[in-house]
Structures are given as structure tokens and as C-alpha cells.
Image (tube, helix red, strand yellow):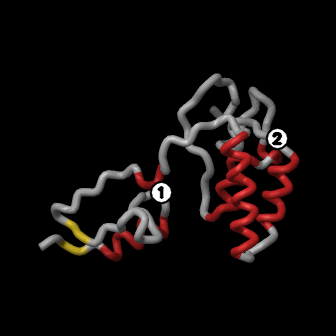
Amino acid sequence: MNEGDFGMAFNYAGSGTGVYNSYSAMLDSKYAKPVGKNSNFNNTVRWKDPRTDQLLDELRRTDDKARVAELSAGLEKIVAGQVPLCPLFQSVWFVNINARRWQGWPKPGTDGYVPHFINGPDFTMTLQNLRPAT
């Protein structure tokens, strides 16, 4: 994956916290390496697009929620229509939860955090809210 020598691959797209970090890691041209060079898990599809870079640059420089939503919508349109990937699932919620011994697990779509150990703050919040099942 990192060297770009593949025809098809099963991988994650985006990383980090927030919209900018996810899209930047996945699509920013500054991370696009030539095939054969290690991409360090960033922009493994070697995406290069001036409009994408423009939206990312604007997104990086704002914290206005309405503007973030607008710029994100532009990036989503590019991803859906042009980027060679097919989303299969949201990786952070493909975890199995067994509530037999513990209760207080976060609920998808309701709670703002996920019970996955790779998301440090989310995992901490999960542990703080668990209590023995009765």
C-alpha cells in the first residue's frame, strides 16, 4: 500500500481527528509520492487535484462551523465522484460489544465517542462510563 504498487486494496481512508485531518491524510497532494516511494500511510492512492488542495487549505484555516460544513461538502463531492475508492464501513464502529458483564457502552449515532482502543480519548471515555452489569 505505502509504495503504491497495487491494483486494488482493502485499506482505511482518512485518519486523525476532525474533518481536516481525515481528508488531508487521504487526499492532500503534499503527501502524494511517486509509485515505489513510501507514502507513510498518507494519500496512498496518490491523489493530486488542485481543487482538493484548495478546499483543504481553506478548511485548515477556518474554525467557522458553517464554513467547515461547506468545505467538507465540496470534499465529499470530490471523494464520491472522482477519488478511486469505495467506502465499505466506518471503521471505528466495527467493534463487537458484549454487555453481559459491563454496561454503559456508547451507542452508535447517539454518543459522540466510540469504544475503540485506537482512539485514545474515546477509549478513556468508554472506560469511565462502564459499570458492572447487574
- What element does badge 2 sit on? loop
Place of residue 40 in the rendered image (x, y in percent of width and height, measured from the top left): 68, 42
Q: Quadrant of residue 62?
A: bottom right
Q: Is residue 86 left or right of residue 77?
A: left
- What element does badge 1 sit on? loop
Q: Classify 10 Å Cα crowding around label 2: few (below 14), some (14-19), many (20 and above).
A: some
Image quarter where the C terminus lies is: bottom left
User: Against 131, is 14 above or below?
Assistant: above
Q: Is residue 14 left or right of residue 129?
A: right
Image quarter where the N terminus lies is: top right
Residue at image coords 64%, 24%: 6
Place of residue 70 in the rendered image (x, y in percent of width and height, measured from the top left): 74, 65
Residue at image coords 70%, 58%: 73
Q: Quadrant of residue 19?
A: bottom right
* Tag nearer the camera, 1 or 2: 2
Place of residue 26 in the rendered image (x, y in percent of width and height, measured from the top left): 68, 47
Q: Is residue 88 left or right of residue 86?
A: left
The alpha-carbon separation of the residues under discs 1 and 2 comes to 29 Å
Say if mark 1 contacts mark 2, CB within 8 Å: no
User: Against 23, is 126 above or below?
Assistant: below
Residue pointed to by mark 2: 48
Residue at image coords 68%, 35%: 84
Place of residue 126 in the rendered image (x, y in percent of width and height, measured from the top left): 37, 69
Residue pointed to by mark 1: 118
Identified by mark 2, the residue type is Lys
Q: What is the number of the mark on residue 57?
A: none
Residue at image coords 21%, 67%: 102
Q: Classify 10 Å Cα crowding around label 1: few (below 14), some (14-19), many (20 and above).
A: few
User: Against 130, is 55 above or below?
Assistant: above
> Which numbered disc flags the more N-terminal residue, 1 or 2?
2
Identified by mark 1, the residue type is Ile
